[in-house]
Image (cartoon, rainbow, N blue to C red):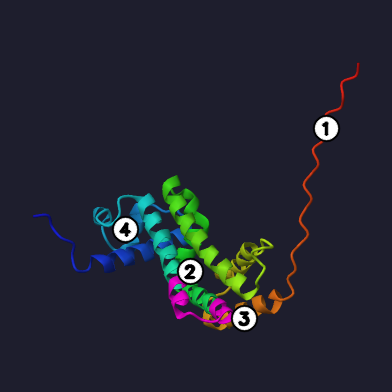
């Protein structure tokens, strides 16, 4: 009979992904070897290959695990069936708090997903698009007409611009925590949301007609 997985397999796998994410975040995916991952995890390189096939799969597991957790957060908030503003505020708070515990994974997602093979990269990007679409739909509920003006997705991306890059400046030893900053992000977004007007669309450039040939 084939040997089954040990009872600690999932726990050890999660520990490996967390440690690898830290290394990739600190050194970059290209600058980290599997030998270094194994050493940081306190296991042999052959033991590491018991959990992942190669470095590509390790990267894919890290980013897929991260975006899967984000999609799960969206589903959890949707299940609460809150009023539109409360729903969007809850999404913001849950995401900011999630990033507090996943800064390394988030940095890997933003900086290293480009190293994935095309099929794996597209899978991750599709999940990201679903998350953005959920935020865009939530914004449309708060500001009806945003979708018709094609603003709901740009507004969602502007909101993610505040959330996604907090890891670059919000330090664990600083005066504010992610939990404290979550309502600040929401207040800043909602405080300016009512004033947003649809921008003037750039006119399409006129095609120049070729000059007639001289006779």
* Relative image position of residue 130 (x, y in whole percent): 49, 61
Q: Residue 184 shows which numbered tag? A: 3
Estimate the spatial distance between the alpha carbons at disc 1 and disc 4, rounded to whole Å.
64 Å
**Mark 3: secondary structure:** helix
| Residue drawn at x 41%, y 64% as measured from the top left | 68
Residue drawn at x 71%, y 76% as measured from the top left: 194
In this figure, which residue is indicated by the disc labeled 4?
38
Crowd tier of the residue under label 2, counting other residues whose Cα lies within 10 Å: few below 14, some 14–19, many 20 or above: some
Identify the mark nearer the N-term, 2 or 3: 2
State which region is magenta. 74-89
Q: Distance between the residues labelled 3 and 4?
A: 40 Å
Q: Is the magenta stretch mostly helix, strand or loop?
A: helix
Disc 4 and disc 2 in contact, CB within 8 angstroms: no
Q: In this view, does 113 lie to the left or right of 200?
A: left
Question: Which part of the image, by quadrant, shows the C terminus?
Answer: top right
Provide the residue designation for mark 2: 103
Which residue appears at 67% of the width and 68% of the height?
145
- Which tag, 1 or 2, sits closer to the chain's start? 2
Q: Residue furthest top?
A: 215
Q: Earlier in the sequence, mark 3 or mark 1?
A: 3
Which disc is residue 209 wearing?
1
Residue 2 image point, x, y percent = 12, 54
């Amino acid at each position: 009979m084939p040997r089954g997985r040990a009872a600690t397999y999932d726990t050890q796998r999660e520990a490996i992904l967390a440690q690898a994410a830290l290394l990739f975040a600190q050194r970059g995916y290209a600058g980290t070897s599997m030998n270094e991952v194994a050493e940081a995890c306190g296991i042999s390189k052959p033991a590491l290959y018991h959990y992942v096939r190669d470095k590509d799969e390790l990267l894919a597991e890290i980013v897929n695990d991260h975006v899967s957790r984000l999609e799960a957060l969206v589903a959890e908030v949707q299940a609460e069936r809150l009023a539109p503003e409360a729903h969007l505020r809850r999404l913001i708070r849950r995401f900011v708090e999630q990033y507090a515990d996943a800064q390394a994974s988030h940095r890997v997602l933003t900086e290293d997903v480009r190293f994935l093979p095309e099929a794996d990269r597209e899978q991750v990007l599709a999940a990201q698009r679903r998350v953005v679409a959920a935020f865009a739909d939530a914004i449309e509920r708060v500001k009806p007409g945003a979708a018709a003006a094609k603003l709901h997705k740009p507004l969602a991306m502007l909101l993610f611009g505040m959330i996604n890059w907090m890891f670059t400046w919000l330090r664990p030893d600083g005066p504010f925590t992610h939990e404290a900053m979550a309502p600040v992000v929401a207040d800043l977004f909602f405080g300016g949301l009512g004033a947003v007007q649809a921008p003037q669309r750039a006119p399409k450039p006129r095609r120049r007609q070729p000059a007639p040939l001289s006779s």
